[in-house]
Image (cartoon, rainbow, N blue to C red):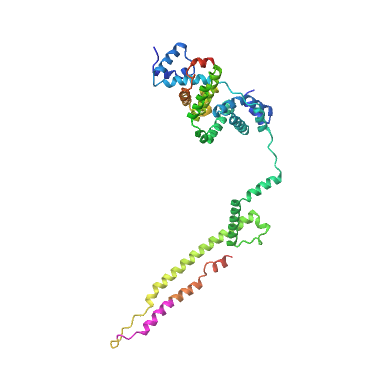
Amino acid sequence: MSWDCAQLERRLEDFLEGRLAAAELAEAEAHARACPRCADWSGARTAALWLHRLEPVETPPGLETRILALTLAPPPQESFWAVFDRGWRALMQPRFGLGLAAATFSLLLVMNTFNISLRDVTLADLNPANIYRAAERQSQLSYARTVRFVNDLRLVYEIRSRLEELAPQREPAPTPAPPGNPASPKPENKEKTPQNSSDGARAQWLLALQTPPFGIGGLGELR
Amino acid sequence: MDDAELVRRCLAEDATAWESIVRIHTRRVYNLCYRFTARRDEAEDLTQEVFLRVYRTLQSYDASHGPLAVWLHRVARNLLIDHYRATRKHRLAVPLEDEMIHLEQKESAAPRPDRAVAQRELSAALEQALARLSPELREAVILRDLQGLDYREIAETLDIPEGTVKSRINRGRAELGKILKRHPGFETLEGVSGA
């Protein structure tokens, strides 16, 4: 009596690797040849048997020596000029050249913005402590300027709004037109309106003069 | 001398220890590479590359994680998979059918090959068929049926569960059986036993 599928699956490794007893093997083989589901296992067993009998290939002569030479040989020493030449050639590639030019341009732009002149730089300026101190001072100054500017701005707008509130109260009441000449113009009114607006502008101008703008009075005091 | 001691001496720049490692494992690694690629020149290059990589990363070997042979297999396996991926396009350009037809024609053209020649040709066909398996199935079959590793060692080498190892090996063998079925002499077990 031959095996069924479940039996073969249970002992599949033993079947494929030739660990079954002769009687068991015959039953398993009979089932594998007859069952369409297990037909592949018969070929798999033959393939495994062939694989087990496949002779190991000989290593090519000298392979071990070549491996030892490859791994134990000291790395080739490059001269200073060879290293320099390799680095220089790498730097001279167009993409690195363009990158270098862009970086230089950006650096010059930043230096120009912050009024940094290389002529004024002394050796002491390169001291990390001095760089830190200068950077801290610069940040404090920038913060103080900003605060002062915001405060000044607030004051200006406050005074301006007060003036605008006061402006209509100082305006005189319009004079009624004489009954006999309704079409005649009123020169007083025409002159009064610009006069009022120029008063407001003058007041704002005076206020602006009294309040030092950003970067002049504030800086002078801070410096 | 155990593996840990050999590696320790290698790291202390003892050339004889490294020489021992190379001499012990070269044949095995070369066979693995050859079975995987089915090309001697590629196998030789890959074997050198495996040992170069092992030499450079020897300090990362941990004896508690398994014998040196398993670690070497793992390094070789990673390299072989990389190599397979890099050369897959080229391999796919030559269809398997063409190679099998070529082998069959070669056999039928022969007057009446004797047993040794037939076996040699079947072995060659087996190597070709092996090279056509997917890398997952191939590495599992090679490690088991050609390298003789047990399931636990293969599971450690491939970093997959033992159940998956068994399944891949069996599927790989079945694929090989299907590929080689058309080859004359494959089904005759007498030929196998006489090899």
Left or right: residue B173 versus residue B5 is left
Q: Residue furthest bottom?
A: A180
- Magenta segment main secondary structure: helix
Q: Is residue A186 magenta?
A: yes
**Vertical arrangement, residue A131 with respect to residue B97, above or below:** below
Q: Is residue B70 visible?
A: no
Q: Considering depth in this image, is A5 or B21 the residue closer to the camera?
A: A5
Residue at 62% from the left image edge and 34% from the top image edge: B56
**Image: magenta residue range:** A182-199
Vertical side of B46 occupied by A23: above or below: above
Q: Quadrant of residue A160?
A: bottom left
Q: Is residue B130 above or below residue A206?
A: above
Magenta span has B130? no
Q: Quadrant of residue A3?
A: top left
Quarter of the picture holding the N terminus of chain A = top left
Whether residue A69 is visible here, answered yes or no, is yes
